[in-house]
Image (cartoon, grey):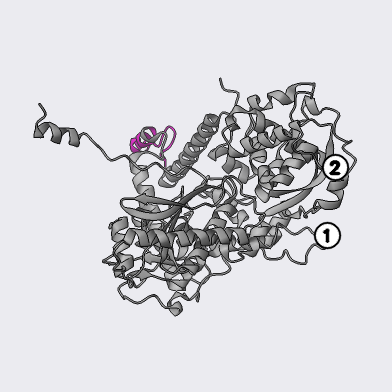
Amino acid sequence: MTTEEDIAWFKSTFRPIPKPELPDDSVEYFIYYLPSPAPAVIDEAAETRARLLEVQRTAAELTKDLLKGYIWQRESFRLEINKDDGMTYLGGRTNYGDSIEDEWVVVYILRELTKRHKDIWVKVVDSDGEFLLIEAAGTLPAWLEPEVADNRVWINQGDLKIIKPKQDTGKKVTEKLSFPQARKIIQEEPTCFIKSTMIQEEAFYRLRNYPKQISENLHSALVTIPRKVAFLLHQKPAYISPAVEAFYVRDPIALKPLRAKDSSDLTFKPDDMVTVSVRFTRVGYAQLKSQEFPVPSSWSGKLPPVDVEPDYTRAETGMKLACGFEMLLYDPHHQDKAAVREMKLVLEDVETGDEELPTNEEIDKTWDKTEDDEKWMDISFEDLDRELKGNGKGKDKDGGNFGDAGAQENLQRIVARFEEFLNDTSAGFDGAEFDDFDTDSDVDIDDDEDELSSDGEDKEASFDEEEFARMMKEMMGMPSVPGQGPSLATPLLNRNRIQDLDADEEEDDTEQIKELSRQMEAELKGTGVLDLNRKKLQQQLSSGDDTSKGKITDAEAEDYDDDNANINLAKNLLEALHGQAGTAGPAGNMLSMMGLRMPKDDRH
């Protein structure tokens, strides 16, 4: 007979099921209807559901208008009504694969929805967590760490809003926020938010060129492919993404039908070819073009000569694409995909005569022949270096500019941020330190407060390869210039890297570093780390015998210490090279940077 104790024990054995982790390369989004103040309605659930259905219809209209003809790398944006802990909301998940732009298309649509419906609040995360905060990492208050960021970051009315902690003392905040708590704050305490223009601009920086940039994520190219492949892509251009991915992640099982010398068993035989314009995602086109793919046996002799351009390039790209479609339909790994099932149904209709393949005349007269420029794929070191220096435009009349305008701007922004970090004199060993935001006030942070002054910032500091190599040689006890002996006594950090430092502060810092170096050296010598033959040297120094080998003076002993330090360093370096076993490693990389090549290690 069951007792209350048995029931209590049985309940104690249950543990909450952990929420599954978000897969890599995926973005997850949640839309809540949270009017402020909370409405006094009889049926709140029905009201919430009705409003969310309106948002869902708006989302459908937006995607139809903004994403007409858009091709997703893996999965598209979609919203479904869900219910969790008694709360009804709209949610969705999109796997964007290698196409980061797909993730930002999702963010753009969500942001536009909040502009059209003021009482909806959006939360969006990916496998890295609150990636909007990652984008704005350099502008965040010190307390906003990843451990306490959950349920604090929201998009509302097109703005990024961050819920402040209850007590912001400028120290580390450990207070975590649950969704019910966040919901209560949103509806009852609308002043408890950080609304910073600077944070928002950084978080949404990638959206600055939207919606124009949406169409620039695609690339059209003329390729020569089997007529069946052209027919499928004309029916639904989105079939291109799974086919390219099947080619990109191919394995021996998927390649099996292509190894046969006879192509009669192939679904897409290389004997009825047409040249058509195919629309790719930029990532997908780069994946297809960059892969080294020997012509399979079933396609042997089907391509034009290599020196016949552009026919050979179009045929080679089309061969890769057709092989991708072949692998997609053959590999059992892909059979559960909706696109595969749809394509098989279309091909069955073609075989039974319910669908007819397009004729050459129809293709020539009615099909698109767009071919985009591929210069965005051409990258060289010279172009990269020129763009990073901001000298790319107007330097090459033949079209040698690096990437597109967006890529150039992003590169210059990255370099500017890196130099800004290097020039930050307040940064310590743990990284950059940022001033805390004044979150004690209940009013939003004013735009004027976001304009941080850059007076006194060192714009000239940059990385000097020659100086770095010289310092590394000195640290290793090697001559930095011809005719100069090793100088281990020179402290590595005793270098003037920032030109605008006050002279007095610089002198004080230098003396502190020298003193620290002397203390460290004395402590290490006391432990015997820097001396391989410490006992032997101590015996000679204490013997006082001037008649045999002579007494060792203090200067000679100091030189002896330096020599042994050099021997120690060389020994450790050789051991590190031996441990690399001929592969890349820290020791080999460091020597290569200084132009030194070590002989082959013949030890067994």
Q: Horizontal and vertical percent for residue 502? A: 46, 73
Answer yes or no: is residue 90 visible: yes
Q: Which residues are magenta?
A: 536-552
Residue at 71 percent of width and 41 percent of height: 288
Quadrant of the rendered image containing residue 407: bottom right
Residue name at image x 67 percent, y 38 percent: 243
Q: Which residue is mark 1?
A: 398
Left or right position of 425 against 472: left
The residue wearing badge 2 is: 359
Q: Quadrant of the N terminus?
A: top left
- Whether residue 432 is visible here, answered yes or no, is no
Q: Position of residue 556 (x, y in %)?
A: 45, 43
Nearest to the eye among marks 2 and 1: give it: 2
Secondary structure under the numbered disc 1 in the rendered image? loop
User: Is 451 situated left or right of 518 in this image?
Assistant: right
Residue drawn where x is 57% and y is 69% of the image: 459
